[in-house]
Image: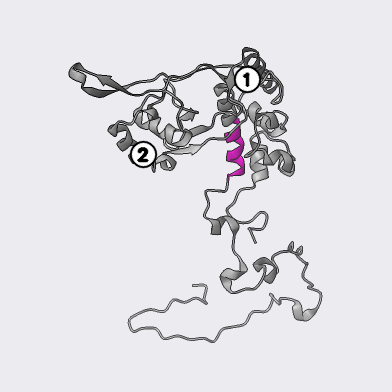
Amino acid sequence: MSWMEGTGPIQDVSAVGISRGLSEDWYSDTGSRKEIKKGNFWDIIDNPLYEAAAGALGYNWDEWVKESKGLVGTDPNDGTIRVRARVKAGIPGGTRTTRGPGGSTGTRDYVGTPPEYEWMTRDEADARGLDYQKSVPRRWRNKETGEVIVGAPNKNNSDKKTRLMYEKEFGSEPGTSSTRTGMASLFLFSRVKDDWGDIWEEARDWGVGDAGVTEDLDEISSYLTDIVNINDHLHPIIREGPKGEHYGIEGDIWEHYGLDKEPEPPKELDWDSYDKKMNLATTVKSHVTYSTPEGITPVDLHSDG
């Protein structure tokens, strides 16, 4: 049994939402409310809660939806959807055997080149015969800094430790650093592979790949999530309220003590019968005495002097 309505330290989630710009009946719209933590771009563009939250954050919802569709496509199933197409294949790195004077041989590592990608519509990629990712690259958020990274390593994520963490999660493409087997890389990989989950958490998949659109969606979703999670900081026993099992009571503790019903209105007392009247006119003289210590003059409480 949780706290009865109007009792306990928890806040009324419905009222909090209304105070932050949501409609009077927003909490009863369970279908829209479920999409606060689930659903992708294509789901939420018709969700009134996201529209209200966006308005509270200063977005013009209709303009934002129109501009976003211009960046990601008008429908998830048609050719206007934007995809990350590979326009140039990568060349794998590796080890090459070399021959020296006198027939001696040796090996030399050489660095490959990564593939090159461009964003374009699915129709454009198909027309050019290009391969493209059929799903949106996964996003990862740094738990400490809030930084969000997308997909495999790129020129903006050149730190070796971060790059190896990417490769642990995503694998590698020809030409990326995992095709090289230097001892330093293997040692560093072994050091970071167990730390991935401590540093990064998977960010929400919005079903679209444009970084600006997903960043906006993260902000709007966070506004709504803060409302529905308003009581999550409380310890469970405080958030859920007292239960009968805590006090050796079987069943509902509120029902046990008759507190599950509205209190009856106050009743006017019946003063008509003599035995219920207070006789305030009659005084009764007290005969109680007490001893006064020697040397103390008693106070005269009964005379006018």
Residue at mark 1: 82
The one of 287 and 37 positioned closer to us in this rendering = 37
Q: Which residues are magenta?
A: 220-230
Q: Residue furthest front?
A: 103
Up-down relation of residue 260 to residue 185 (above or below): below
Tell me what residue is drawn at x 41 percent, y 79 percent.
298
Q: Secondary structure at mark 2?
A: helix
Picture coordinates of residue 283 (x, y %)?
A: 64, 79
Q: Badges 2 and 1: C-beta atoms under 8 Å apart?
A: no
- Total labels: the figure holds 2
Q: Amino acid at mark 1?
A: Arg
Up-down relation of residue 267 to residue 123 (above or below): below
Q: Secondary structure at mark 1?
A: strand
Picture coordinates of residue 165 (x, y %)?
A: 41, 34
Magenta segment includes 285: no
Location of the N terminus by quadrant is bottom right
Picture colour scheme: one colour
The one of 169 and 96 positioned closer to us in this rendering = 96
Tell me what residue is drawn at x 72 percent, y 43 percent.
30
The one of 159 and 238 positioned closer to us in this rendering = 159
Magenta segment includes 229: yes
Residue at mark 2: 192
Q: Residues within 10 Å of mark 1 (few under 14, many from 20)?
A: many
For the stretch drawn in magenta, the main secondary structure is helix
Picture coordinates of residue 247 (x, y %)?
A: 57, 72
Up-down relation of residue 292 to residue 55 (above or below): below
N-term-proximal mark, 2 vs 1:
1
Q: Quadrant of residue 124?
A: top right
Residue 19 located left or right of residue 88? right
Picture coordinates of residue 34 (x, y %)?
A: 68, 41
Whether residue 110 can be seen here: yes
